[in-house]
Image (cartoon, rainbow, N blue to C red):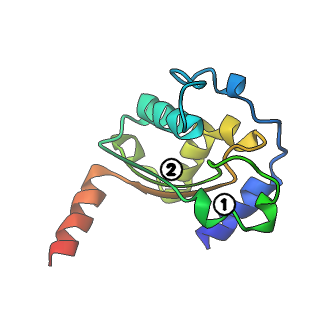
Amino acid sequence: MLSRTVLGLARAIPRRPFSAAAMASSPSPSSSQTPVEDVIREKITAVLKPSTLEIHNDSHLHAHHKAMEGSTSRETHFRLIITSDEFRSKRQPARHRLVYGLLKEEMDQEGGIHALQLRTLTPEEEEKQRNEAKE
């Protein structure tokens, strides 16, 4: 259900042309092979100070979709796992809105983020899941 919601949200956003200049906040966008991923990492790290940050670029799994027809971007679909103290006292929808807000510019850009799958945890939730997996 989350995927459909995220995809629906991403499609509803008007797109602007994607350009390396728009990624100016990235350390060196012109030399990077992954400018969108670099910006995701930079923004999330700066604001959320995560103890865990996994960024999975799943774009290759969706390249055949009609919505991706004609796209030259190789950075459109991401799956993120984020563990942060900043998520304490926030429910999942609020956590997701926080991340969407951080990445709004990248989601608005043509050739930018088309779909974003999120798994957001507090350190305690991550530890609990780790312990349950051991059992």
Vertical position of residue 8 compared to residue 56: above or below: below
Q: Is residue 75 above or below residue 68?
A: above
Picture disc at residue 6: 1
Q: How many marks?
A: 2
At horizontal 76% and vertical 35% (from top left) the residue drawn is 18
Q: Secondary structure at mark 2?
A: helix
Q: Which mark is residue 44?
A: none
Q: Position of residue 56 (x, y in %)?
A: 47, 54
Q: What's the residue type where badge 1 is placed?
A: Val
In the image, residue 73 sits, relative to residue 64, either above or below, namely above
Q: Give the residue type at disc 2.
A: Arg
Taking 87 as reference, is 23 left or right?
right
Question: Disc 2 marks which residue?
Answer: 95
The part of the image, by quadrant, that contains residue 35 is: top right
Q: Residue at x 29, y 42 (%)?
A: 51
Q: Where in the figure is residue 45, as x and y percent of width and height?
A: 42, 33
Image quarter where the N terminus lies is: bottom right
Residue 32, placed above or below residue 4: above
**Percent position (x, y) of residue 94?**
54, 51
Residue under the point 22% across and 59% down? 127
In this rendering, position of residue 21 left or right of residue 86: right
